Image (tube, rainbow, N blue to C red):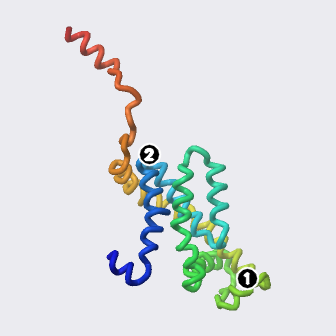
Amino acid sequence: MADLLRRSGLQGVGTWLNKKVVEPFVEILSRGAEPKQLAFSTALGITCGVFPIVGVTMFLCVLAIAVLGTSINAPTVMLANFVATPIELSVLIYVYSLMIVFLRFGEYLTGGDHFSLTSDALKKVLTGKASKEILLSIAHALLGWFVMAPFILGILYVVLVPCFTMLVRKFSTGGLSPKKDDAPSYTEVMLKVRGV
């Protein structure tokens, strides 16, 4: 595999991916955070990361971190958002792949007209010359995302909890819930007293 990457000129991608994604992920897991908190944080980061307006996802994540505070793991939210960025960018590269889903669902919810997506429409949005129809289609995509986001978040959470439970056990140095102290419990002391 390394030889294939070297011949194709993509050897640096593996190094970059390891440094920017894998190492931070293992560091988060090794700190022994709770699997449910990690699963929720990851699901939230990915859900915010597929927001239909490119470039806004980081601000959504920062807002979520500010609102939810210590109930989420902030580095995990940001890392999941970072991992979701290629998914968000594929919206632009592969003919609006996720944008179409959110747009069509928003059109269905409002009963709006079917907007045909063209490269010309994208150019107009990027250059600031968007027409009313284009702006309405963006509003439909946002509505579609707002309605689908809780379901995306919930499904990701349910799928990720068992995954993080296994990963935390594997990578955590202290286990899922480390003991506070090694002092014997009240029951152990009472059993020893009775045994004397």
Q: Residue at x 67, y 79 (%)?
A: 111
Q: Residue at x 42, y 51 (%)?
A: 29
Tag 1's secondary structure? Answer: helix
Q: Residues within 10 Å of mark 1 (few under 14, many from 20)?
A: some
Is 37 on the left-hand or right-hand side of 51? left
Between 49 and 32, the one nearer to me in the picture: 32
Percent of width and height locating residue 159: 41, 60
Residue 15 in view of the camera: yes
Q: Residue at x 53, y 49 (%)?
A: 73
Between 89 and 115, the one nearer to me in the picture: 89
Q: Residues within 10 Å of mark 2 (few under 14, many from 20)?
A: some
Q: Which residue is mark 2?
A: 31
Tag 2's secondary structure? Answer: loop
Q: Residue at x 23, y 10 (%)?
A: 194
Q: Amino acid at mark 1?
A: Val
Q: State how many labels appear.
A: 2
Quadrant assignment for the C terminus = top left
Residue 151 in view of the camera: no
Question: In which image quadrant can residue 98 be found?
Answer: bottom right
Q: Which mark is residue 125?
A: 1
Is 6 on the left-hand or right-hand side of 137? left
Outermost residue, left side? 195
Percent of width and height locating residue 185: 34, 21
Considering only order in the chain, which callout, 2 or 1, is on the residue closer to the N terminus?
2
Front tag of 1 and 2? 2
Percent of width and height locating residue 125: 73, 82
The answer for how far apart the CA atoms under marks 1 and 2 are is 44 Å
Q: Amino acid at mark 2?
A: Arg
